[in-house]
Amino acid sequence: MPLRDHHDRFIEPLVTLLLLGLALWTATTHLIGLGLNGNFLDLSRWVWWIPFGIFGIQRLLGTPTPHPLPDPAQRSHPPQSTLLTLAQAATLVALFEFSTPYFPSSRLHLFWLLAMLLLGRAWLKALNHPVGASAPPPPMSRGDIALLWLLVVGAVSITALAHRPDPDDQYYSNLAVMTLQHPERTLLSWNGMIWSEKPVTWMPIDRLPAIELLVAWCASLTHAEPITISHQFLAPLMAAFTVLTHAGLLRLVVPTLWLRVLIIEMFLLLAIGGEIRASYSIFSFVQLHFGKSILFSTLVPLLLMLALRFMRDGTRRDWLLLFFGQMAAVGCSSSALFLAPATVGLGLTALWRPDGASTRRLFVGLLSTLYPLALGMGLFVSMTNIMQAIAWTPLSVEQSLMRVLGQGVNLWLHLLALLAAWTLLPMGPHRRILLGLSFIFTTFFLNPFLYPFLATHVTGPVSTWRLLFALPLTALTALMIVHLAQRLVGAACRTNQDASSPATSGIRPDTFTPQPIILSTPLFLGCVLMVLVLSHHPRWRGFWSEPFSLAGAMLVILLLAEHFQATGRMVQPRARSIVAMLILSTLLASVTHLAPPNRRSPLTAPRTLIHWPGIKAPEREFTLARQIVAHAPQGQSALLPENLGVWVTTLRNHPPLVALSRSYLEQSHAQLEPNALERRLALLAYISGQTRPEEPRRLLTDALAFYRIGLVALEKNNPWREEIDTILLQAGFQGSESHGILLWIHPPHP
């Protein structure tokens, strides 16, 4: 089946259906919740119109217009010499890393200025190059289709099997829980996690997410817990669309190498970045049950692809999809208020040319950002006083880079890919696309002089780092790895072939497919797989084995993909199945690298574990959370350690908590009693065994009455356990033990 037929008739309609469904659901929730102050019952009554709306919009969109086959004269030219530019980019990255002793506070400023000179000069030279004459992707073979769906199956499997507990579930799942428990209240208007005499309201920006309302609606139909819907159904579904959207973007940017780059990108997302606080890996397959992860990993690549396509072709279909795509993005996370327009703006300006037609198309494309921009401006005005009351320190550009890319090899590799990946493409429209993306991204989103303004007036002080997700840097890194590997392997294979053969003369590195001679040696495969196994064994796990195993794994899956993509006469059905299983096994094995403690000490439990599909929560804590919800007295609050409170609030009919984490208390303390932040945090630290207050007996005794506490839990190894036990016994609580936790419950009053 040709690629355009397979892509247009199945993949693109599938992605379009997801996008339109999320967009119309978001518009419905915003109209009812924000516009009419309606509740969940109103929303349930109006859901019926969404299928009809999707059908009508699809009729308006029409069918995708296939690109005509290009004239051979318009094909990309052979690549020019790029070693000098590549060396200059590597020098800039080395300068950034080793200039810390000399420029500790301004090394990024120097790096940015030099990067602007490097990229700006090349961008100005390529500014007038045409971008509308790009060739369509080559026809997709059966091997391409099989490999793509193999990656989809692998992504779904990894998402279902990988368990990486995260405290953000406390907030996201609770939005759905509170919606189900109080369907008569205004949508997403009430913070049900925290105890208070009067209801505590969320900030206006917290009323935007619609994905949690979708989870609540599905839970109401199935009578399941919202956390079950999001962890076991939503996340695997979004994993499949993540692969498809990344594939669509790569097919537009690197049509001859898109599948190989996609394979390496998926591997990089699973194999590196697990120890970084907010890396691309963290927000990929292991946390796709969060709306912000869906935004970063699924919708941002889709929006970037649509923006590039609209700027190249200017079709009504792409503009409408851009508009509805940003609407869907806002429904996933409030970060889309600035990230969605930033991504669309990046894609549009990357292909801008200094002429009237291109400028008009740019402004028409920017009109698609009206929905998130209008919402953002309205919320910014309404939240000015609230934001001024919260003492948040803005992050610098360097701090944002460290937060997303970490330090060391991971940071260097991504920065080098940003500066130099475009140099590896042959001259033509695709190189122009990649160069424009790198230049515009560096100009605005790595600009240390512009960053304070963005933090103050656009993103908020603690969210500016999310702008770095506007460009999937992992895709650029994968492209650089594939190109370098292709050139090395291709050169090695060509040396073994007849140089005078007409079949090998004039072969370009971007189109050459090396013969899988190496794969015929069982020793090679055995050695690489042995390295992978040893690198995950506790006795051999460590810093030395990680780079070696990652390099070996990338090489083997690249060569396996080459073998799998080879002509049908070279790959028999049985061999194809074996190759497919090896690729899938390698991807599954790489997910354990997302467990950073395992890299340093085999005695520390990893953060990411492979289990049967289920709730992505610590088994002990989640079991205790169920027991607490079952035994908590009605109408009373609970005082719990933070590790238990996270999961209690994800369940229906949970008791409100006295204390949450600092970030959630900071957002709500203005609506609570005087000195609520200090008092509640002191109680949380005391019951968690972290610090002991000055007058613990008085603090806890007063809190039992003031907060109407009916249940208290503490670990058996709490250093002040005897003291707390005595206070609770004197207050009439009755204790029991379960899974190393002491549960103190106050009997109901007669």
Image (cartoon, helix red, strand yellow):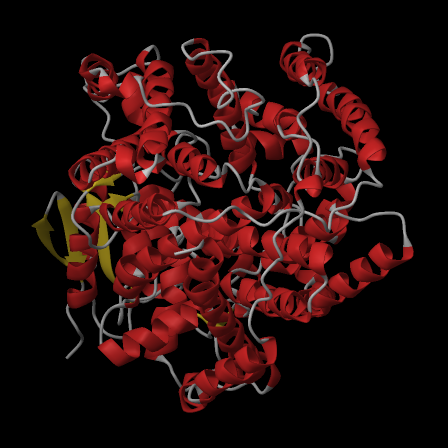
Q: Is residue 731 left or right of residue 303?
A: left
Q: Position of residue 215 (x, y in %)?
A: 36, 70
Q: Quick one: quadrant of the N terminus?
A: bottom left
Q: Is residue 304 above or below residue 501?
A: below
- Front-lying residue, 570 or 320: 570
User: Looking at the image, how many numbered discs can be counted on the residues?
Assistant: 0
Can residue 381 be seen by looking at this rendering?
yes
Determine whether 151 is above or below 402 in the image.
below
Residue 665 position, x and y percent, is 48, 55
Residue 733 visible = no
Against 627, residue 352 (above or below) is above
The quadrant where residue 722 appears: top left
Instruction: Between residue 589 and residue 38, name the one nearer to us.
Output: 589
What residue appears at the point 40 percent right and 88 percent down from the top-left corner? 41
The quarter of the picture where the C terminus appears is bottom left
Q: Quadrant of residue 204?
A: bottom right
Query: Considering depth in this image, is 421 or 713 the residue closer to the camera?
Result: 421
- Which residue lies at the image location 54% right of the left edge and 34% below the top edge? 403
Q: Is residue 259 left or right of residue 134?
A: left
- On the picture, is 548 further left or further right than 499? left
Residue 77 placement, left or right of 15: right
Where residue 552 sits: x, y (%)?
A: 33, 18
Q: Nearer the viewer, residue 443 or 530?
A: 530
x 78%, y 45%: residue:
130
Give coordinates of residue 434: x percent, y percent: 66, 38
